Image (tube, rainbow, N blue to C red):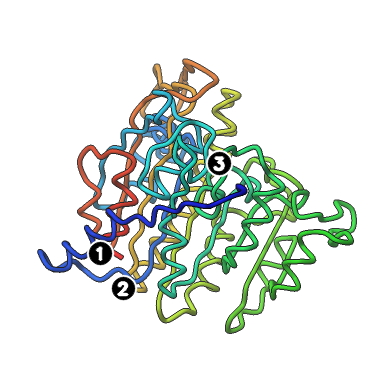
Amino acid sequence: MRTGFKRYIRLFCVLGMIFLSASARAEPAVKNVILMIGDGMGINHITAARISLEHGAYSRLNLDTMPYTGFSITFSNSSLATDSAAAATALATGFRTDNGRLATLPDGTFVQSIMLKAKEQGRSTGIAATVSITDATPSAFLVNADSRALERTIAEDILKTQTDVLLGGGADAFGINPFTREPRARSLMNEALAAGYTYIYDRDGLINLEITPDLKLIGLFMGGNMSFEITRFPTEPSIAEMTMGALQVLGQNPQGFFLLVEGSRIDLAAHSNSTAEMVGDLLAFDQAVGVALDYAQKHPGTLVVVTADHETGGFGIRSGDPSGERVNYGWLSTAHTGAMVPIYAFGPGADRFTGTLDITEISVRIAELM
């Protein structure tokens, strides 16, 4: 991403803590990590999704079944209200940075994500998101950039990581013809195909995918971001279906995997103060959480951590009946806020994600357990 000498910080502090952990206490073995981020998802967003269900406030989400909970303090190096790039950098690397930066410190120093470290250790890696895979959150786990706006370069660098599964939007950035759904000449997708990726572009391609050993998968289902859940096209897979497909591919590796799942459009709905779209996408994200929890229950050694990068909109529930009738909502803003966000955890080491944590501690604790 930059010319000249590239300086990488290899999370030496995290690795040192891993060695200390190994000698000081017996940690449960974590083979697989599923990190799930509800972009912009605050506590009241979750509450609204819960009370929208059949039994109103008495309903329970998949999130509500997770046994360990905590809070994350999200501010960035440059602002009390972090943006998604700086927050994703904190979640991916354990370092705070300025808004707009992807896995780079304020002075430009590159930092390495726990996903890329997992790749170095022989684990498979994957991303599923409901925005373009070149957007801020997915990108912070895969590339280093001084600005999240460098989409073309980010797309090029994503391919260089040889990530095993890439699912989401972003077909335009990879040179896909929007009418034929085929790669244009000299497109990035042609480079991906030459590198051994299998390309799919619709829900049928994902649902009917033949899982083969050493499969590398790239699925780009929209030119830019994917649709909101309540207006999702039949050709677009749900986030739960993308999660399931990613797990089928990554789960073949006997050394384990690291999967990032982002419910990205919760944030975009909150930016426009659209309660219906926000609730729809949060419920879809919760279904993906259910898929992850089901996998973890069937595959011991799988840690599931669910959190948000920040809260969006200053969303609140003002009044209503516990049955879910006549509920009145309020929005403080169309921007991000500095509110704390929840953390949920299930699986080996899940008890380490309780209490009030700094956002940078989440990746450190995952790295220790790995």
SS under mark 3: helix
Say whether disc 2 or disc 1 marks the residue closer to the N-terminus.
Answer: 2
Disc 3 residue crowd, few under 14, some 14–19, many 20+, Cα 10 Å? many
- Determine whether the residue tagged by mark 2 lies in a helix, strand or loop: loop
Badge 1 marks a residue whose secondary structure is loop
Determine which of the numbered discs, if any, sits on residue 281 in the image.
Answer: 3
Residue drawn where x is 40% and y is 17% of the image = 318
Alpha carbons under labels 2 and 3: distance apart: 29 Å
Mark number for residue 348?
Answer: 1
Q: Amino acid at mark 2?
A: Pro
Q: Disc 2 designates what residue?
A: 300
Whether 241 is drawn above or below 41: the answer is below
Look at 44% across and 21% down and name the residue there: 314
- Position of the C terminus, as image quadrant, is bottom left
In the image, residue 113 lies at what x, y percent? 44, 54
Q: Residues within 10 Å of mark 2 (few under 14, many from 20)?
A: some
Q: Give amino acid for label 3.
A: Asp
Nearest to the observer: residue 146 or residue 33:
146
Left or right, residue 182 beside residue 341: right
Q: Nearer the viewer, residue 24 or 230?
A: 24
User: Camera-side residue: 33 or 114?
Assistant: 114
Please state if 256 lies on the left or on the right of 206 as rendered. left
Q: Examine the image and state in which quarter residue 337 appears.
A: top left
Which numbered disc covers residue 221?
none
